[in-house]
Image (cartoon, rainbow, N blue to C red):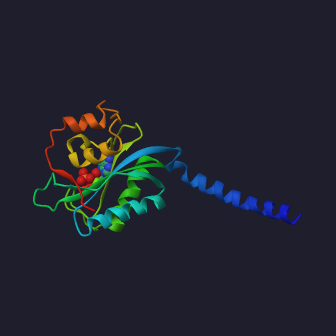
């Protein structure tokens, strides 16, 4: 009898779970989507920033499955900057794309500097490369990432994880994009 009444009391917990689901409906998919994120840092303790960024993903609803090696990469946009440390993370999430971007920006701000110059130096940059096979073109969010095919610092770590993954717009695999890119900037494995 005691057990039964406890079970009964448990239904209150069930109601709270339903309430949470309702609240999240607008920003959650029913199924998890496979995503690829590019992480980069060129200020401060770069490896620590990337590690903290990856550690923060889980609490934001982004389940990390695999991560590439870390690469030392030559800056592409501003030649006077320090070299970057970059890698790519394979993950899955139920967050919808806009919400995913918000969460990444929140983590960037929490762990990085408050003021960031677009494509300038930063403690932590997190970009969405792919969101499943989705093609998204809005002022705030472009997926697949529009400069992905012109960036060896993205293609090299991405090819380490998924060389055969097909780009949903360019219809080339990651390995083909890497072989064909016109970017000649240097990307080398970081020493541990
Ligand atoms: P970048 O990543 O190109 O060096 P920023 O990190 O400064 O530049 O990003 C500038 C803006 O790019 C962000 O405010 C965001 O709204 C937009 N953006 C568009 N598509 C993406 C994407 N796929 N991933 C991350 N940010 C994106
Ligand atoms: Mg960015």
Provide residue 63's location: percent of width, then percent of height.
47, 53
Provide residue 142's location: percent of width, then percent of height.
32, 43
Please report the residue visible at 21 percent of the width from the left and 36 percent of the height from the top.
179
Q: Is residue 41 visible?
A: yes
Horizontal side, residue 147 vs residue 28: left or right: left
Provide residue 93's location: percent of width, then percent of height.
47, 49
Q: Quadrant of ligand 2?
A: bottom left
Looking at the image, is 51 positioned above or below residue 98? below
Nearest the eye: 72 or 121: 72
Query: Image quadrant for the C terminus?
Result: bottom left
Please report the residue visible at 43 percent of the width from the left and 49 percent of the height from the top.
91
Tell me which corner region of the image, top left, top right, bottom left or bottom right, holds residue 13. bottom right
Provide residue 37's location: percent of width, then percent of height.
35, 50
Horizontal side, residue 78 vs residue 130: left or right: left
Please report the residue visible at 29 percent of the width from the left and 62 percent of the height from the top.
124
Looking at the image, is 28 positioned above or below residue 7? above
Horizontal side, residue 9 vs residue 184: left or right: right
Please report the residue visible at 65 percent of the width from the left and 54 percent of the height from the top.
18
Query: Image quadrant for the N terminus?
Result: bottom right
Q: Is residue 139 visible?
A: no
Nearest the eye: 180 or 122: 180
């Amino acid at each position: 009898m005691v057990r039964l009444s406890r079970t009964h009391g448990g239904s209150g917990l069930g109601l709270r779970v339903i309430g949470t689901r309702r609240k999240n409906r607008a920003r959650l998919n029913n199924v998890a989507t496979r995503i690829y994120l590019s992480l980069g840092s060129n200020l401060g303790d770069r490896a620590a920033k990337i590690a903290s960024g990856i550690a923060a993903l889980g609490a934001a609803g982004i389940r990390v499955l695999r991560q590439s090696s870390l690469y030392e990469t030559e800056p592409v946009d501003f030649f006077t900057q320090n070299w970057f440390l970059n890698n790519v993370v394979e993950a899955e999430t139920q967050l919808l794309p806009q919400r995913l971007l918000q969460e990444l920006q929140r983590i960037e701000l929490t762990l990085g500097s408050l003021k960031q110059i677009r494509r300038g130096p930063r403690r932590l940059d997190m970009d969405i490369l792919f969101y499943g096979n989705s093609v998204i073109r809005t002022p705030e969010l472009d997926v697949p990432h529009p400069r992905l095919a012109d960036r060896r610092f993205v293609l090299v770590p991405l090819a380490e994880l998924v060389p055969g993954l097909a780009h949903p717009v360019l219809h080339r695999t990651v390995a083909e994009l890497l072989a064909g890119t016109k970017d000649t900037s240097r990307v080398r494995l970081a020493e541990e």
